[in-house]
Image: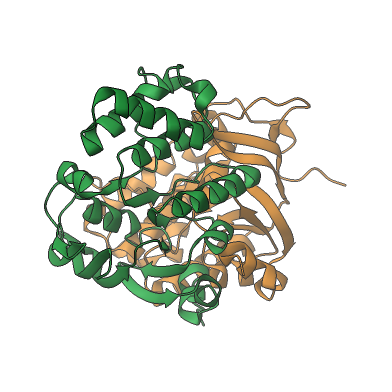
Chain colours: A green, B orange
């Protein structure tokens, strides 16, 4: 059984079909990237999987169980957690408290165990020395890592990262790719969306490409990026 | 060498804690069409916003600057920059939906430099886009996407600018309309107006550009003649990494 199955998922907003009959599956331990030009439907698709939105048609199965429409809290407790394009940290709480919220909520652990868990994930993302600072004092790269620690702290098996590398410089992108590979080594499954193609090439096992809400390609990253349909979606069509 | 019409010099800019542009330098000579291309998230729109004073530049040692006709315009308010002769066609056209086509166009001529010539500007815009003349009494919200784009271009021309900035004018348009927009930009340029075109679709932007810059993760990574860049494998590399 696949960890996640997306079956014919469609989301309409009035006349606009943001996601149109999209199918794919995600296996345990995989790193899958969803890419596509602006407005392709990537964030909408992530929201549908994370329970922040419900599909107009189609279904989402997690470990064989339908989850579409459950709501983000229930989906999180089942084992799917998501970061946001703009990290949604609690600005006045300390960095450690932010991660603690994830650990307490996601797995309903006791306070002592959750604190331990939070400390471990903060060390893992390299923020141990910032643990007691208010989250609002963090730089953008640090906020992204704190957001990742919080999501990992929920104990989620499937981690959804929505443009977790936006605004990072080259070096920080390389560090983020290395960190996400370690997340996988710790047994987590990752689904990411990202504009930085070099990061995708260095990270993803498989890529699904969306354009105007439809899946136009799927496969290994280097092959997919050379697919004429994908090149056309990104660079535009020739006009006579 | 003569001063370029527009010179963007080592500009850093961003939003709050997020830095988007990293040392961006580019120039636009009088009479040119220059394109700024790059995949989404590269920072193209932020360059436009920086030129217009809609995002502040970050101070850096040695100094970032934006010069128009040799004079510093960074730090000026957007309306002051428009008064000096820069007009924009924003992404998604952003026409005033509850105003008529004619009133939208007249809004463009509110700047002092354009008031006296309003009637003549209007004739020129209608000659270029006869569709706008046909629909001049209609509310802008009733226009199609392509007509809105024409209206936004017309509104910008009404301010009698010396430099026209266009942000993704092909976005969401069907091919026949894209062709019409390309032709309009070419014609505007042949009449002597300088153009900086931000555009993701390289088949649209590069063939008509004298020069083009490729922006990647907020940095200029390539500069060449437009048609030459169209043949360059580096462009695909920049967009898709392979």
Q: Decide if residue A94 is on the left or right side of residue A170.
A: left
Closer-to-camera residue (A21/A212): A21
Q: Please tell me whether residue A155 is drawn above or below residue B242 in the rendered image.
A: above
Q: Position of residue A159 (x, y in %)?
A: 35, 50
Q: Position of residue B3 (x, y in %)?
A: 80, 42
Q: Decide if residue B63 is on the left or right side of residue B141.
A: right
Residue at left offset 41%, top offset 56%: A193
Residue at left offset 33%, top offset 46%: B104
Please indicate, yes or no, whether residue B203 appears anywhere in the rendered image: yes
Closer-to-camera residue (A126/A48): A126
Please indicate, yes or no, whether residue B132 appears anywhere in the rendered image: no
Displayed quadrant of residue B83: top right
Query: Extreme right residue here?
Result: B1
Q: Position of residue B181 (x, y in %)?
A: 47, 67
Closer-to-camera residue (A64/A211): A64
What is the quadrant of the N terminus of chain A in the image? Answer: bottom left
What is the number of callouts on the image? 0
Q: Position of residue B51 (x, y in %)?
A: 59, 39
């Amino acid at each position: 059984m696949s960890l996640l199955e997306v079956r014919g998922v469609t989301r309409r907003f009035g006349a606009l079909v943001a996601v149109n009959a999209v199918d794919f599956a995600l296996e345990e331990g995989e790193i899958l990237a969803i890419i596509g030009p602006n407005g392709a439907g990537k964030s909408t698709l992530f929201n549908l999987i994370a329970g922040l939105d419900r599909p107009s048609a189609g279904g989402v199965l997690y470990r064989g169980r339908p989850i579409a429409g459950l709501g983000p809290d229930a989906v999180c407790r089942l084992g799917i957690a998501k970061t946001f394009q703009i990290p949604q940290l609690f600005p006045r709480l300390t960095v450690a408290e932010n991660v603690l919220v994830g650990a307490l909520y996601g797995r309903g652990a006791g306070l002592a165990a959750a604190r331990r868990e939070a400390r471990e994930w903060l060390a893992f993302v390299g923020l141990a020395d910032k643990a007691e600072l208010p989250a609002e004092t963090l730089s953008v790269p640090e906020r992204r890592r704190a957001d990742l620690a919080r999501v990992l702290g929920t104990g989620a098996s499937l981690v959804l990262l929505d443009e977790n590398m936006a605004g990072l410089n080259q070096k920080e992108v390389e560090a983020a790719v290395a960190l996400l590979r370690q997340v996988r080594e710790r047994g987590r499954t990752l689904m990411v969306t990202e504009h930085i193609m070099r990061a995708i090439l260095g990270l993803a096992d498989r890529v699904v490409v969306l354009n105007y809400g439809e899946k136009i390609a799927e496969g290994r990253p280097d092959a997919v990026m050379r697919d004429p349909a994908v090149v056309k979606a990104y660079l535009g069509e020739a006009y006579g | 060498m003569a001063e370029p019409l527009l010179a963007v010099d080592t500009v850093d800019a961003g939003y709050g804690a997020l830095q988007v542009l990293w040392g961006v330098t580019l120039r636009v000579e009088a009479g040119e069409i220059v394109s700024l291309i790059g995949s989404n998230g590269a920072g193209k729109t932020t360059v436009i916003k920086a030129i217009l004073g809609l995002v502040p530049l970050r101070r850096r040692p040695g100094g970032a600057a934006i010069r128009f006709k040799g004079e510093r315009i960074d730090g000026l308010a957007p309306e002051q920059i428009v008064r000096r002769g820069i007009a924009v066609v924003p992404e998604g056209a952003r026409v005033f939906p509850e105003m008529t086509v004619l009133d939208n166009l007249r809004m463009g001529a509110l700047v002092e430099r354009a008031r006296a010539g309003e009637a003549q500007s209007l004739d020129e815009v209608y000659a270029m886009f006869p569709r706008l003349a046909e629909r001049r009494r209609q509310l802008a919200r009733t226009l199609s996407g392509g007509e809105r784009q024409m209206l936004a271009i017309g509104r910008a021309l009404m301010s009698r600018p010396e430099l026209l900035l266009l942000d993704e004018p092909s976005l969401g348009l069907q091919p026949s309309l894209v062709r019409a927009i390309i032709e309009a930009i070419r014609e505007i340029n042949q009449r002597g107006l300088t153009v900086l075109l931000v555009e993701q679709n390289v088949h649209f932007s590069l063939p008509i550009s004298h020069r083009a810059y490729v922006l990647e993760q907020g940095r200029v990574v390539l500069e060449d003649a437009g048609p030459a860049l169209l043949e360059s494998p580096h462009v695909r590399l920049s967009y898709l990494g392979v």
